[in-house]
């Protein structure tokens, strides 16, 4: 992707100079942005919560330790999910990339008996 | 495609930072002030004396509690430490006894550490106000904590995406070019503040989330303990659930020998003494180690039989995850004994505050640069500039005004503590109004000048209104009082320098009608 | 001890900074030769590593590492601010700060 202003002023990152070219980033019209924001905030939280629960149920340590580990790690996973959502090539891919791990983690939680 | 990824991250960094930037600024600044929570509380109750050589305050407090709350099921004593001279007792009111609204069933009193008698200090929330504000924003606790948690999550995302965006992170490591126009200096400053204190920013954001993690992420506890949070806490911290009353009167064991035992084991006095079922045969006394002596704030406790005074148990070594949580918690609170380490935390906290502020100003500067040709600022830009001015300059003014309110409000005003808080918001509101109606460089300069005056003159106000001014507190080594006076004055000096530079810039900038959104950016462009 | 840690950290950052073309030109004129660049870089990293030791000695491992990161931040920040405003002072402080720190930590208390 061409980024002429950034090349001219090599010392500063592109965002300091040029605006993001919305036409080139096809899925970045506002429905796309809205969809991604929802995916990031709600979907990301769901993935993080499922991961925290799955780790709490399955980590091979004492249950208190497992719960603490899962809960503490969940925020990093949340941040990772948000980055993924906004880095994905399209909003659709972003959602799919959240739903797959969510399904997997959900299955783990269900098997671990945490759903009841 | 690599460029595309970086652009996405730049977009994410800009918006995740901008949307919550003003709240983050407030959280960072009041959070940094909270490093001095104890000192500010002391400063705001000048009637309390520094601990005098006398009886052991904790023993005196227990004697007072025997009179004040003989039928309470639980007493707590917080003895004065190096960082605060306050001796506070809290007790749970017996069930079925009517309590004043808002007290949540607890009684709460400050005692004179020399005599153990209740003192009548002025009503004030002290440093507690800033501390609570930094995680619940003076909103209903549940709402406030979720809002701050959301903003902290956005901050975490902004930090990571910012690092990805900043491709010349090492090449520009030492770069700072003041006085260059068009947002370049703001960008340099933002980068330097962010990169050089990056470990602190990451640490304080993540550990902040961890301090309230059971509220934000209760699902693990929910699934494994089926919602039994008490059982979870007991397993993590090794603290037994409260004892049951035996309903057999028995005198409480003397506390002195227990304090000596704690001293012998920890090398310091406890930070908290808890007595369960005092005056009953089932009584226990639990001492908790003061958290300034270790990096972790996992509570270390000694539990004694409350009648015989024998040691019943000491909290064991926590597991790896519990220890990690304790370290995270302790790092966030930063209650270290060493003044130098605390100073480093305070400086890093100020760097974080300034990082958020420069980020917000940078956004406005870039937008204004872009709009310069169009001749008129859009609504978004004007909104951001008003919010920037109202927050970045308005909040320090309001915080310093809170100190003034503490000294100037009549001592016996009803709901005095609440009025101090109203003054804080009143000043902040005025600053916001100025930002709305008179945006521009001059308003920035005058607001910083006002804040600088409030800060610089605070020691003078203290001299006029109390007998514990610098002339007394410095020779006496009364550091809570003198330190607060001096640090606030130093902060005022800093704001004064800022204001002076802004006034000079405003004088040089082309004379424009001071309407419709001329911000800091105008001088930058000029 | 803390002053020694700070001085070493400052000197270390100064070394790394001088190993860069732009800052070498700003502070000493000209570009550094390859050998000199590697020397500066090596000494810089070595001093940064050494600055950890006083912190560990003073505060122990846990708080020591925390304090060290804080000292690094303040040292780097001082350097970054001195370069545009007082480049000669920035340079001179490189050897002076560690020496002063050493003197302070050896001085009888």
Image: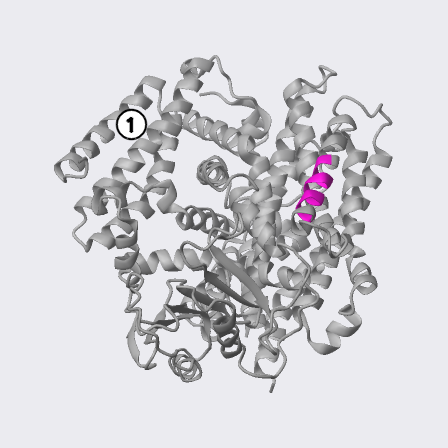
User: Which residue is at a point 81% across and 40% down the rendered structure image?
Assistant: B446
Residue B189 higher or lower than A6, as above or below: below
- Predominant secondary structure, magenta span: helix
Q: From where the camera sits, is residue B120 visible?
A: yes
Q: Quadrant of residue B377?
A: top right
Magenta residue check for B421: yes
Which residue is more in the foreground, B124 or B249? Answer: B249
Q: Quadrant of the C terminus of chain B?
A: top right
Mark 1, other Cα within 10 Å: few <14 / some 14–19 / many ≥20: many
Q: Quadrant of the N terminus of chain B?
A: top left
Q: Nearer the viewer, residue A46 or B362?
A: A46
Q: As displayed, is residue B74 above or below residue B306?
A: above
Residue B456, quarter of picture: bottom right
Residue B256, placed above or below residue B77 = below
> In the rendering, at what x and y percent does residue B207 appear?
43, 50
Q: Can the viewer see residue B351 in this picture?
A: no
Q: SS at mark 1?
A: helix
Parent chain of label 1 = A
Across and down, in percent, residue A83 comes to: 39, 32
In this orientation, which residue lies closer to the viewer: B351 or A87? B351
Say if B23 sits above or below B306 in the image: above
> On the image, numbered disc 1 is attached to which residue?
A98
Residue at the limit of the structure toward the left, as seen here: A111
Give the residues in magenta: B420-429
Q: Position of residue B505 (x, y in %)?
A: 81, 38
B238 falls in the magenta region: no
């Amino acid at each position: 992707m061409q980024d002429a202003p950034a090349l001219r002023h090599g010392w500063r990152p592109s965002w300091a100079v040029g605006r993001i070219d919305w036409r080139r980033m096809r899925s970045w019209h506002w429905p796309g942005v809205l969809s991604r924001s929802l995916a990031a905030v709600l979907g990301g939280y769901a993935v993080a919560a499922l991961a925290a629960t799955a780790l709490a149920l399955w980590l091979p340590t004492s249950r208190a330790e497992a719960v603490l580990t899962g809960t503490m790690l969940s925020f990093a996973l949340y941040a990772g999910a948000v980055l993924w959502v906004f880095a994905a090539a399209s909003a659709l891919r972003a959602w799919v990339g959240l739903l797959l791990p969510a399904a997997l983690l959900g299955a783990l939680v269900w098997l671990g008996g945490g759903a009841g | 495609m690599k460029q595309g990824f970086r652009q996405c991250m730049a977009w994410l960094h800009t918006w995740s930072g901008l949307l919550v930037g003003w709240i983050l600024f407030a959280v960072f600044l009041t959070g940094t002030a909270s490093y001095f929570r104890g000192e500010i509380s002391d400063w705001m109750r000048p009637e309390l004396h520094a601990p005098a050589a006398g009886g052991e305050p904790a023993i005196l407090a227990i004697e007072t509690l025997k009179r004040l709350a003989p039928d309470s099921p639980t007493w707590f004593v917080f003895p004065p430490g190096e960082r605060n001279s306050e001796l506070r007792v809290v007790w749970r009111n017996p069930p079925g006894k009517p309590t004043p609204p808002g007290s949540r069933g607890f009684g709460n009193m400050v005692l004179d550490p020399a005599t153990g008698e209740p003192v009548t200090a002025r009503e004030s929330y002290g440093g507690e106000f800033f501390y609570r504000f930094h995680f619940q924003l003076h909103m209903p606790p549940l709402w406030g904590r979720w809002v701050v948690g959301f903003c902290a999550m956005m901050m975490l995302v902004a930090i990571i995406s910012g690092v990805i965006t900043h491709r010349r992170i090492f090449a520009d490591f030492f770069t700072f070019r003041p006085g260059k126009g068009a947002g370049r200096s703001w960008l340099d400053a933002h980068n330097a503040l962010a990169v050089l204190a990056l470990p602190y920013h990451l640490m304080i954001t993540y550990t902040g989330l961890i301090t309230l993690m059971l509220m934000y992420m209760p699902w693990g506890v929910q699934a494994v303990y089926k919602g039994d949070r008490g059982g979870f806490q007991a397993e993590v911290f090794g603290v037994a659930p409260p004892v049951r009353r035996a309903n057999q009167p028995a005198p409480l064991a003397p506390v002195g020998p227990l304090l000596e035992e704690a001293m012998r084991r920890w090398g310091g006095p406890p930070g908290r003494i808890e007595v369960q079922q005092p005056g009953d045969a089932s009584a226990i006394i639990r001492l908790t180690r003061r958290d300034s002596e270790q990096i972790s704030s996992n509570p270390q406790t000694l539990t004694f039989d409350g009648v015989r005074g024998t040691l019943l148990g000491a909290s064991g070594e926590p597991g790896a995850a519990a220890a990690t949580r304790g370290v995270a918690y302790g790092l966030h609170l930063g209650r270290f004994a060493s003044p130098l380490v605390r100073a480093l935390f305070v400086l890093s906290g100020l760097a974080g505050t300034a990082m958020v502020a420069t980020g917000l100003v940078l956004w406005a500067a870039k937008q204004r640069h872009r709009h310069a040709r169009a001749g008129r600022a859009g609504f978004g830009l004007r909104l951001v500039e008003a919010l920037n001015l109202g927050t970045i300059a308005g909040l320090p003014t309001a915080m310093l005004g809170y100190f003034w309110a503490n000294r100037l409000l009549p001592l016996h005003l009803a709901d005095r503590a609440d009025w101090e808080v109203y003054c804080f918001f009143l000043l902040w509101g005025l600053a916001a109004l100025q930002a709305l109606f008179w945006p521009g460089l001059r308003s920035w300069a005058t607001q910083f000048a006002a804040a600088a005056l409030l800060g610089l003159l605070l020691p003078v106000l203290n001299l006029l209104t109390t007998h514990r001014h610098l002339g007394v507190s410095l020779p006496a080594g009364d550091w809570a009082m003198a330190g607060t006076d001096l640090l606030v004055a130093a902060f005022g000096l800093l704001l004064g320098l800022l204001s002076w530079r802004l006034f000079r810039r405003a004088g040089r900038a082309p004379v424009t009608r001071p309407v419709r959104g001329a911000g800091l950016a105008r001088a930058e462009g000029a | 001890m803390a002053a020694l840690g700070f001085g070493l950290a400052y000197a270390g950052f100064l070394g790394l900074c001088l190993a860069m073309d732009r800052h070498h030109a700003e502070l000493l004129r000209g570009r550094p030769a390859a050998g000199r660049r590697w020397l500066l870089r090596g000494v810089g990293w070595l001093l940064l590593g050494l600055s950890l030791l006083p912190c560990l000695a003073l505060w122990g491992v846990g708080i020591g590492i925390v304090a060290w990161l804080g000292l690094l931040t303040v040292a780097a920040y001082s350097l970054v601010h001195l370069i545009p405003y007082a480049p000669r002072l920035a340079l001179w402080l490189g050897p002076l700060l560690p020496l002063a720190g050493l003197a302070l930590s050896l001085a009888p208390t």
